[in-house]
Amino acid sequence: MEANVKGNLISLLIVYALFFMWGFVWNLFNVLATFFQDSFDLSNIQVSLGTSLSFLAFFLVSYPSKIIISKYGTQKAIIMGALITGLGLLIFFPAASYQNYNVFLTGLFILFSGVTILQTVCNPYIGTFGAPDTREARINFAQGTGAIGAALTAPLGGWFMLELFNGNIFGGIKAFYLIVAAIFFLLSLMVHSAKMPANKTETLHTSLLDSLKIQGAFKYRHFVIGFIIMFVYMGAEAILYQLMTPYFKEIGGVSSARAVKFSSIIFYGLMVGRLLGAWIMTKIEPAKILGHFALIAALLVAISMFSNGTTGIYAITAIGFFISIMFASIFALATKGLGKYTNEASSFVIMAISGGFFIPLLYGVVADLFSLRASLVVVVVSLLATSLYGFFFKRIKGNNANNELINSLI
């Protein structure tokens, strides 16, 4: 029994390490964006392709991830995800050697394809490590470790590639990406060697045809609405990240350098909020926290819309703490109580991250027709919808007993 507990702890730590590492690589490309723009004389659209490709990977690879899990199981799916992520990182070596931007973009897409597989399999899997009533807290804590990784990206990656290798940044890119790729390969080996606990939500299919079938997650109302909410929320989050620097310059009259410093505050709020939110969710019902936090975030955006100077800036930066629990909470609630359909639901909810690609297009139309300030209405509406999902989750989900009965009959 003691050996089993120890084995589960080691497996849990490995999965947490994966969350940390994919959080770390999430923003690596952004660290190099300005360098790439100057080195390759890129337009803003060409630079933004880096962000677009990451969201496109979530759109294209999430459902194939479900097929991989159904065909090969949780443990092998994690190994594949880590290996593909490592492969994407490795491609940065020849890209830097030949100084070819298109090869960098190819590596980035492969990297995020691997991250998509890891997100699809690990988010529901981490929820099985313990009691069902603390599932949302575990997913939030795991996302918190990813937030720590994301917070360390700029200081570590920027220092290594842009400062330590100043004068030979392409050499720094090759060395740094080789190191990070090696870590992912090591983690894949650790997953292969570890005795990973069985995934209770796993349903294996021996044939590819069975794996391709959409099984039954769409029979659950709370999943369908949760999928839509994730799509619009991720769009709102992407808008906030894209908007911050130009918006701060517009309403605060600050320099670009100062606007960047202000924008970094939101990421520290994300890190603190996710770690603290995991603890809060063991004390308060997660759906209620989601409802209140999303409502507060919407109010902060509205305050910023009608404010100028530092008031408008700080209203936006304060949002980091309140949106910190959004992704993990929406994911956990949308996939709650789905039993054998959990992995299928997970693949679609991860696909909804592509809202970060599609919704900002709407924001761009509003910004061009009116102003950056007016475009924030898209964010407010998205956050209010998220808040309603939290407040009315119990009513949306309906009777648990009926859901379980349906699940057992299908």
Image (cartoon, grey):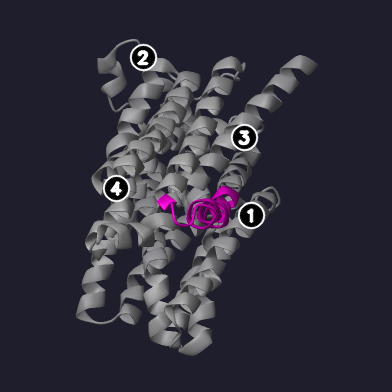
The location of residue 271, given as percent across then percent down, is: 60, 56
> In the rendered structure, which disc, 4 or 1, sits on the residue that comes first in sequence?
4
Q: Secondary structure at mark 3?
A: helix
Mark pair 3, 4: CA separation? 35 Å
Q: Amino acid at mark 3?
A: Pro
Chief SS of the magenta region: helix
Identify the residue position indicated by label 4 in the image.
Answer: 53
Q: Nearer the viewer, mark 4 or mark 2?
A: 4
> Circle 2 — which element?
loop
Question: What residue would you read off at disc 1?
Answer: 277
Q: Is residue 161 magenta?
A: yes
Amino acid type for the residue under numbered disc 4: Leu
Residue plotted at (43% across, 77% down): 256
**Distance between the Cα atoms at labels 3 and 2?**
25 Å
- Which mark is first along the chain, 1 or 3? 3
Would you place residue 214 above or below residue 369 in this image? above
Instruction: Return the x and y of residue 75 as percentages of the image width and height.
Output: 50, 20
Mark 2 highlights which residue?
Answer: 205
The answer to which image quadrant residue 252 occupies is bottom left
Look at label 1 and name its amino acid: Gly
Q: Indicate the secondary structure of the residue bearing disc 1.
A: helix
Sequence-wise first label, 2 or 1: 2
Give the CA distance from mark 4 to mark 1: 30 Å
Q: Quadrant of the N terminus?
A: top right
Residue 89 or residue 134, whichever sits in front:
89
Disc 2 versus disc 1: distance between alpha carbons?
36 Å
The residue at the far top in this view is 206
Classify mark 4: residues with Cα within 10 Å, few (<14), some (14-19) or many (20+): many
Estimate the x, y position of residue 253 in percent, counting from the top left.
43, 88
